């Protein structure tokens, strides 16, 4: 499982999290009572506000809902279970679900276990040009049966690190609107990708402004570093209050038989942070620290490879974003990296940028050079 | 138009409805007896001292927040198994079990239900006692299983319909799944005596049923963790390889931290490893890995001798207060001059009590006395205090005389 590492290669508990945990520990008025089934109200409202933006028309028009969930995975699962029961008819397990090729490997299992029978992939990664296969993606959307569900990575696509540009998102949205395709966003890296919460939420907010009804599964594992507290949120954007209320009432029933009510500790940390202007500013700063370090490692790795004259082009390393990068190394080269240089990457050539430090950059760059030139 | 125009409004939760109505009531004497959480003698939530100490230890250690393994915190799952099975248990010592951390009782029940749906091909039927916890039915249904029932509660005597239970269970098709409440049956508070448990074990073994124990109140029922786990341990000793869901919501007051565990007793340690691998495959697409906080608190308490001792005292304290409220309620009813037999109130055990009150009587208690409970006459004894037990007795007498 991937987690952020400091330049010393260590896990990092965000300073603002430490501060808020101390506040919580010192507050003896707090207890361990059950949260409501849908979660801590202050958490839910703030979490959705982070995704949709303070000035979101959907929030103003009171047509959003939130379900506190166990991490991004839990949010995906609740959304998937709801869609299987209530989307495109009642209990329509035949509705096609499209997942990007490649994607986070757990996406498939989430939708299979939720009961969907027809899981397909859509073109995404173009290995030859090391970028987004936009035409393939759009073609798949044109050919997809109406009402198909599409799992979209809001930013920092896992595992390729390759996101559509705003113009490309506009094209995607246009096709999805015309063909009545359902957008289910997976937002696990908001803030962590570019360092800016707003920038990383652009795609989700654009779809909202285009009038889509959508789901957005949010994770606070990476951007709050709260991995093991399982803090997530499923944001529901609907046409109006009434529809959203009915959706939430049914999601409540799904939650009740899955985990009854969500864990309180992590949600409290996030809610406290997001509802205090000062703590919120500190958090954004902490997030930027993490994002900046990853961005620095990307630019440093790229410049070293270019200095070494390593064959090929390496701009994809800085053009990609987030925790992961598809280096473009082939399986033989990957094997070399692992066996000869003890640098561990996936067979796909995916590298975790958080594993890079100022101390190992030279070694990694040289090793890639060797792998490619041997 | 919306994708969701046809989505029906889900029915309101019956128990939540009780609390909502209670909140709106302005009567200063009002009582909320629907609440399924422990309250102290001032009617306030109670954070155990051993929990506060464990939390202080955690705060001082400055640990990281790295993901737990899918199966949860190892120190916690091991201690959980030992708590349920007993340290001298052959099944425990031989390692022929697997315990995974679950999201409190519900999450643990659901993991087990999903596991049985996928791997227990002999039957789709789960037999629940009549009545059972309201959430059991939708949990098993959502996991893809079917629900059946066996007689359990006798409303005429407000106690166990043992002959009815034995009769029904002896006719359950072989290799079906039967769910049993390990102690402090919810909602009735009616538990079998040890002699009756022995007979239940025999018939269940004869019918070759898969036994699913739900233990949400270990320690909280009698005040003694070993006594409350007696049935679970006896069944295992009789060679019945049970599955078990545990919760630390009530006995450690960790409600919102969602600490629980799911255990499968296996033939041997090798089988346990295979079962574990499949449980992980089920958990990963549900929520990836479990939350740390509650499990770590529970683990520290169970694994630190001083804290464990303190916990046992505190859990006994909670159980004793409940038992004392039962006793006081009965004596107050007698003082009021009630001629009814209220013995079941002290015979029953745990957080809940099936009073035997009829819906019309419950209605009057709510309307005339601002005493809130569910329509089935179930009260949470945890909501009774020495300050309000007299008022409760008075009100019950008024509607039953």
Image (cartoon, coloured by chain):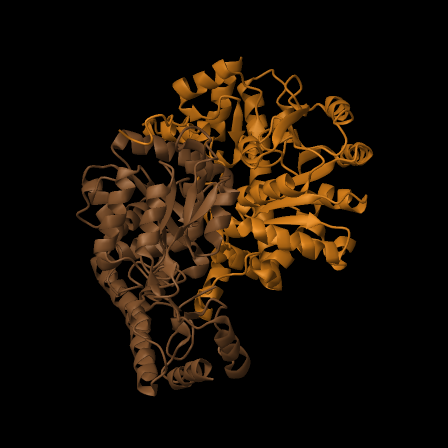
Chain colours: A brown, B orange
- The answer to whether residue B9 of the structure is visible from this angle is yes
Q: Position of residue B128 (x, y in %)?
A: 64, 30
Q: Is residue B92 visible?
A: no
Q: Is residue A285 above or below residue B338?
A: below
When asked about the image quadrant of residue B204, the answer is top right
At x 50% / y 83%, what residue is drawn? A341
Q: Say left or right for B113 vs A327.
A: right
Say left or right for A7 vs B302: left
Compared to residue A314, the image places residue B96 above or below, namely above
Give whichever of A153, A348 is nearer the camera: A348
Indicate whether A71 appears above or below B326.
below
Q: Which residue is at 46% across, 32% downward?
A: A92
Is residue B167 left or right of A242 when viewed as pictured? right
Q: Estimate the x, y position of residue B323 in percent, counting from the top left.
A: 60, 37
- Position of residue B268 in the picture relative to residue B38 (left or right): right
Residue nearer the viewer, B384 or A309: A309
Number of numbered callouts drawn: 0
Q: Percent x, y for residue A161?
A: 35, 64
Between A109 and B19, which is closer to the camera in this rendering? A109
């Amino acid at each position: 499982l991937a987690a952020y590492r400091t330049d010393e290669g260590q896990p990092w508990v965000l300073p603002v999290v430490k501060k808020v945990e101390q506040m919580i520990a010192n507050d003896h008025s707090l207890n361990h009572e059950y949260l409501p089934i849908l979660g801590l109200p202050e958490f839910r409202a703030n979490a959705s506000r982070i995704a949709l933006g303070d000035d979101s028309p959907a929030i103003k028009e009171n047509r959003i809902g939130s379900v506190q969930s166990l991490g991004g995975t839990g949010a995906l699962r609740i959304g998937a279970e709801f869609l299987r029961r209530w989307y495109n008819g009642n209990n329509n397990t035949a509705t096609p679900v499209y997942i990007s090729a490649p994607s986070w490997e757990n996406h498939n299992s989430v939708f299979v276990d939720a009961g969907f029978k027809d899981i397909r992939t859509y073109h995404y990664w173009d290995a030859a040009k090391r970028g987004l296969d936009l035409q393939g993606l759009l073609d798949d959307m044109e050919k997809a049966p109406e009402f198909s569900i599409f799992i979209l990575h809001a930013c920092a696509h896992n595992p390729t690190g390759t996101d559509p540009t705003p113009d490309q998102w506009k094209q995607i949205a246009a096709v999805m609107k015309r063909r009545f395709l359902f957008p289910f966003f997976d937002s696990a890296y908001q803030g962590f990708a570019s360092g800016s919460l707003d920038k990383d939420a652009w795609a989700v907010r654009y779809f909202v402004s285009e009038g889509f009804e959508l789901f957005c599964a949010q994770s606070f594992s990476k951007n709050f570093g709260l991995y093991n507290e399982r803090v997530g949120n499923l944001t529901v954007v609907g046409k109006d209050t009434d529809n959203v209320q009915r959706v939430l009432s049914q999601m409540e029933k799904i939650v009740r038989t899955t985990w009854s009510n969500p864990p309180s500790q992590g949600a409290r940390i996030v809610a406290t942070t997001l509802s205090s202007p000062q703590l919120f500013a500190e958090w954004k700063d902490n997030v930027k620290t993490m994002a900046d370090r990853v961005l620095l490692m990307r630019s440093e790795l790229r410049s070293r490879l270019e200095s070494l004259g390593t064959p090929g082009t390496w701009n994809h390393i800085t053009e990609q974003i987030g925790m992961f990068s598809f280096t473009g190394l082939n399986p033989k080269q990957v094997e070399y990296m692992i066996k000869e240089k003890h640098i561990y990457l996936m067979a796909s050539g995916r590298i975790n940028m958080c594993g890079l430090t100022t101390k190992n950059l030279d070694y990694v760059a040289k090793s890639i050079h060797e792998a490619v030139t041997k | 138009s919306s994708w969701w125009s046809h989505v029906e409004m889900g029915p309101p939760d019956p128990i939540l409805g009780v609390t909502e109505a209670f909140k709106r009531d302005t009567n200063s004497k009002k009582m909320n007896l629907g609440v399924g959480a422990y309250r102290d003698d001032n009617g306030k939530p109670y954070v155990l001292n051993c929990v506060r100490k464990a939390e202080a230890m955690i705060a001082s250690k400055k640990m990281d927040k790295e993901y737990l393994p899918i199966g949860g915190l190892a120190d916690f799952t091991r201690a959980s198994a030992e708590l349920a099975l007993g340290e001298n248990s052959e099944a425990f010592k031989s390692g022929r079990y697997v315990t995974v951390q679950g999201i409190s009782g519900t999450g643990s029940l659901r993991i087990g239900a999903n596991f049985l749906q996928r791997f227990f091909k002999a039957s789709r039927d789960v037999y629940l006692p009549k009545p059972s916890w309201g959430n059991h039915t939708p949990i098993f249904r959502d996991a893809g299983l079917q629900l059946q029932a066996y007689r359990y509660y006798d409303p005429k005597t407000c106690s166990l319909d043992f002959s009815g239970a034995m009769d029904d269970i002896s006719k359950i098709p072989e290799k079906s799944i039967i769910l049993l409440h390990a102690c402090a049956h919810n909602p009735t508070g009616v538990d079998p005596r040890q002699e009756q448990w022995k007979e239940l074990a025999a018939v269940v073994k004869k019918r070759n049923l898969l036994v699913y124990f739900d233990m949400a109140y270990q320690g909280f029922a009698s005040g003694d963790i070993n006594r409350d786990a007696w049935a679970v341990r006896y069944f295992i000793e009789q060679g019945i390889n049970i599955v078990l869901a545990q919760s630390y919501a009530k006995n450690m007051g960790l409600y919102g931290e969602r600490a629980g565990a799911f255990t499968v007793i296996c033939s041997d340690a090798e089988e346990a490893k295979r079962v574990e691998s499949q449980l992980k495959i089920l958990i990963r697409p549900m929520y990836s890995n479990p939350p740390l906080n509650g499990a770590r608190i529970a683990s520290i308490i169970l694994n630190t001798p001083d804290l464990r001792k303190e916990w046992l005292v505190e859990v006994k304290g909670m159980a004793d207060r409940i038992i004392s409220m039962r006793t006081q309620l009965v004596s107050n009813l007698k003082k009021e001059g009630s001629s009814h037999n209220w013995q079941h109130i002290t015979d029953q055990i745990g957080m809940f009590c099936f009073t035997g009150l009829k819906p019309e009587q419950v209605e009057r208690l709510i309307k005339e006395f601002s005493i809130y409970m569910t329509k089935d006459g179930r009260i949470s004894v945890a909501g009774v205090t020495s300050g309000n037990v007299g008022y409760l007795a008075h009100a019950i007498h008024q509607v039953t005389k």
